[in-house]
């Protein structure tokens, strides 16, 4: 597997299909660029999901998140894009993506996007 940023999310079969369980990722090193100012934006992303047939492979998730580093994205758009891409790759029973962005100009932004039901 490559060590370069990539939008290619790798998946593997859920080892416990038929048992509902939750997977939680804490991703504290997310960065992108403000599309208005060009300044870096830093965020902690929390990803929670209940898998159906597949789970996401962690290195591919890391490289996927890294792929946003030099791109301009509004907080709302990038959080929803991450949810959409993960839902497309995994078709989970439930997924929640929370983008908790560092304070910028005295304002902290937290964006929560969900798919499905617990």
Image: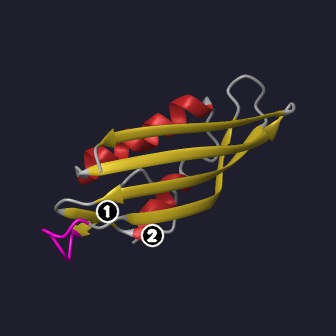
Q: Is residue 107 left or right of residue 112?
A: right
Q: Please tell me whether residue 21 is drawn above or below residue 42 in the rendered image.
A: below
Count the marks: how many? 2
The local crowd at label 2, few if under 14, some if 14 to 19, many if 20 or more residues have their Cα within 10 Å, is some
Q: Are marks 2 and 1 in contact (CB under 8 Å)?
A: yes
Coloured how?
secondary structure
Find the residue positioned furthest to the right. 106
Q: Quadrant of the N terminus?
A: bottom left
Helix, strand or loop status at disc 2:
helix
Q: Main secondary structure of the magenta part?
A: loop
Residue 13 location in percent, x, y?
19, 70
Residue 51 location in percent, x, y?
26, 60
* Separation of marks 2 and 1 at Cα, in angstroms: 8 Å
Q: Please tell me whether residue 101 is drawn above or below residue 64 in the rendered image.
A: above
Q: Which of the two residues, 26 or 31, is positioned nearer the viewer here? A: 26
Find the residue positioned furthest to the top. 36
Residue under circle 1? 10
Find the residue positioned furthest to the bottom. 15
**At x 26% / y 54%, what residue is drawn?**
90
Comes first in the chain, label 2 or label 1:
1
Q: Is residue 31 left or right of residue 84?
A: right
Query: Is residue 11 highlighted in magenta?
Result: no
**What's drawn in magenta, residue-wise?**
13-20
Residue 113 location in percent, x, y?
45, 38
**At x 49% / y 60%, what residue is drawn?**
63
Helix, strand or loop status at disc 1:
loop
**At x 45% / y 43%, what residue is drawn?**
82
Query: Is residue 14 highlighted in magenta?
Result: yes
Residue 44 location in percent, x, y?
64, 53
Numbered tag placed on residue 59 in the rendering: 2
**Location of residue 36 (image quadrant):** top right
Q: Is residue 109 left or right of residue 61?
A: right
């Amino acid at each position: 597997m490559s060590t370069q940023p990539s939008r290619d999310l790798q998946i593997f079969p859920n080892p416990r299909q038929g048992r509902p369980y939750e997977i939680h990722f804490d991703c504290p090193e997310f960065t992108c660029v403000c599309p208005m100012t060009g300044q870096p934006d830093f965020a902690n992303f929390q990803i929670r999901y209940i898998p159906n047939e597949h789970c996401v492979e962690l290195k591919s998730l890391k490289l996927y998140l890294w792929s946003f580093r030099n791109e301009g994205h509004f907080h709302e758009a990038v959080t929803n894009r991450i949810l959409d891409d993960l839902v497309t790759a995994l078709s989970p029973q439930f997924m929640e993506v929370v983008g908790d962005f560092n304070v910028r100009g005295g304002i902290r932004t937290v964006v929560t996007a969900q798919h499905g039901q617990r």
